[in-house]
Image (spheres, grey):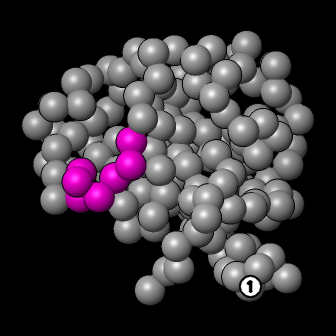
Amino acid sequence: MLPDLDPPFSVVLVHPQIPPNTGNIARLCAVTGSRLHLVEPLGFSIADKDLRRAGLDYWDRVVARIHPDVESWEASAPFPRVHLFTGRASRTLWETDFQPGDQLVFGSEPHGLPPELLERHADRTVSIPQQPGLRSLNLSTAAGIAVYEALRQVLARGPKGG
């Protein structure tokens, strides 16, 4: 069983497009005690049957917040405890110091994070290592890797961060 983190991690999805990915990430958030932030516009309705099918039995366990746009989310984000995941970052998640309360931010499936967001916060970018020449990991897979690496680091340090 995972301990409750105070504050918990958050997974932020900027303009997600594929309902089953968002549903799987909602399930990830429920089982890890993480919060979910969705940044509009979304490529689907959160009532979409495919989204519900991927995580329906967990929706009542997800603490979710919807932001109307990137700027609204940014105004509420706990910088510098934000990590923007992109394949173009030079720092990997293994070189990143995750702490309780961090926000792990992912872009849309076809486009990734908006370039202007990456430019504004270039020092906050993180990559997940992979073999060269391959496009990318599935969004829900990447989110799962990131959340569990963040949890591993926090739990390895112990409950008081020591």
Left or right: 55 in relation to 89: left
Where 96 sits versus 113, above or below? Answer: below
Left or right: 95 in relation to 21: right
Seen from the viewer's position, the closer of residues 138 and 118 is 118
Q: Which residue is mark 1?
A: 158
Left or right: 24 in relation to 139: left
Q: Quadrant of residue 157?
A: bottom right
The amino acid type, in three-letter code, at marker 1 is: Gly
Where 150 sits versus 118, above or below? Answer: below
Where 66 sits versus 20, above or below? Answer: above
x then y, percent, for residue 68: 45, 15
Q: Residues within 10 Å of mark 1 (few under 14, many from 20)?
A: few
Picture residue at 53% right of the left edge, 39% below the top: 12
Q: Quadrant of the N terminus?
A: bottom left
Helix, strand or loop under label 1: loop
Picture residue at 73% right of the left edge, 13% below the top: 116
Is residue 72 in view from this perspective? Answer: yes
Is residue 125 in view from this perspective? Answer: no
Picture residue at 38% right of the left edge, 68% below the top: 31
Extent of the magenta region: 58-64
Left or right: 56 in relation to 119: left
x then y, percent, for residue 97: 83, 61
